Amino acid sequence: MDKKVQKTDLISVVAPVFNEQKGIVIFYEALTLALKKAGVDLEIIFINDGSTDNSWEVLKELHTKDHRVKLIDLSRNFGHQNALTAGIECAQGDAVVLMDMDMEDVPDTILEFLAKWREGYKIVYAIRDRRQVSLIMKVLYKFFHWINALISDFQMVAAGIFCLMDRQVVEQFKKLPERDRYIPGLRVWVGFKQIGIKSDRGQRYDGKSRVGVIRLIKLAADSVFSFSTLPLRFAILFGLFFSFLSFCMVAAIVWIKLFTKLAIPGWTSILSAVMLIGGIQLICMGFQGEYLLRVFNEVKNRPNYIVRESLGFERKID
């Protein structure tokens, strides 16, 4: 039976905040205006992820004006994915929407999410149709999603964090304790009935993108090494290939030595072969190191975040 959204249903919107004091009110007004059309109850959970500007003060002022605004203040910057995790674990809604609050995720798209939710989909995510970024960044995004889908152990989708998750999905998501988190991958991993809808990516409220290449590389690495074992198998494949190649080379050298008068190739070919194999060995060790790093992080068993203060919740958030 298709799920009907009633006025008694609660929609939780989870949005991390990091040094966004100028954009908080802009996002809040656009979000509340968009969801006013949906006829649902609303809670907005802002997670202050170690902001060093006046973001927390702006958020507290907003909380005093609107009881639907709930706040989590983390003790330091724990990163985008961990901040989202904090919001997910505290959200009480029948459905939970994850989004950035810089206006690149367009609030009106949530109405389309809700329409698909009514049809019975448990997860609805945004597929970026157009991005307000440079040509180089567009190419890098497409290349990452292509590689990610190619080598992943299960079918990955070219989507970011902007999505709606049903309460049933959220409860399962909360059971995933891993530290190096890539939420779009975890969202696919949990399964359930999912669908993507095309959505243009809006322009940031101040027109200046803050997503750096280093952050994107870290996120890409978390995705690749968390959801694919293919890099580990590269070492075996390379080893088998070069073992076979070296066997052929030894056989050829012996044949040349015994049955011809040709000179054995000199030091240049030997050096080139050594450098090639040495480079491949270092690459394989690097892949193994990435997996070992993630095992190390899991073994330490540290929490994904630490809450300094929370406002608007029925109980104190630890």
Image: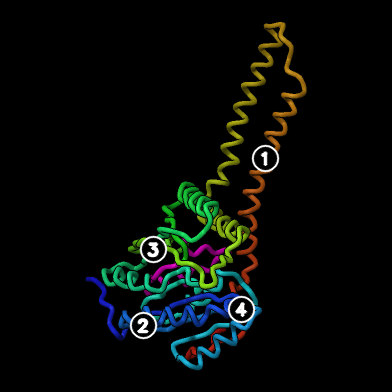
**Which residue is the site of mark 4?**
306
Picture quarter with the C terminus = bottom right
How far across and down, in percent of the image, does residue 291 sit?
Answer: 61, 54
**Residue 41 spot, x, y in % from top left:** 35, 85
Give me the residue at 57% from left, 64% from top.
211
User: Closer to us: mark 1 or mark 3?
Assistant: 3
Secondary structure of residue under mark 3? strand
Colouring mode (rainbow / by chain / secondary structure / one colour): rainbow
| Image side of residue 243 versus residue 168, left or right | right
Q: Residue at x 57, y 41 (%)?
A: 234
Q: Is 4 situated left or right of 162 in this image?
A: left
- The magenta region covers 162-184
User: Of label 3 and label 2, which has the lower sequence position?
Assistant: 2
Q: Earlier in the sequence, mark 2 or mark 4?
A: 2
Work out how far the residue at label 3 is from the one at label 2, CA to CA, in angstroms: 23 Å
Question: Based on the displayed image, in which of its 4 quarters is residue 242 positioned?
Answer: top right
- The percent position of residue 299, horizontal first and vertical second, equals 63, 64
- The residue indicated by pointer 3 is 199
Specify few, some or many for label 1: CA neighbours under 10 Å numbering under 14, 14-19, or 20 or more.
Answer: some
Which is nearer the N-term, disc 4 or disc 1? 1
Residue at left offset 41%, top offset 63%: 200
* Residue farthest along the left direction in this orientation: 1
Q: Which mark is residue 281?
A: 1
CA–CA distance between discs 1 and 3?
A: 43 Å
Tell me if mark 3 has few (under 14), some (14-19) or many (20+) residues whose alpha carbon lies within 10 angstroms of its own. some
Q: Which of 211 and 172 is in front in this view?
A: 211
- What residue type is disc 2 on? Leu
Pointer 2 residue: 10
Q: How far apart are marks 1 and 2 (CA)?
A: 54 Å
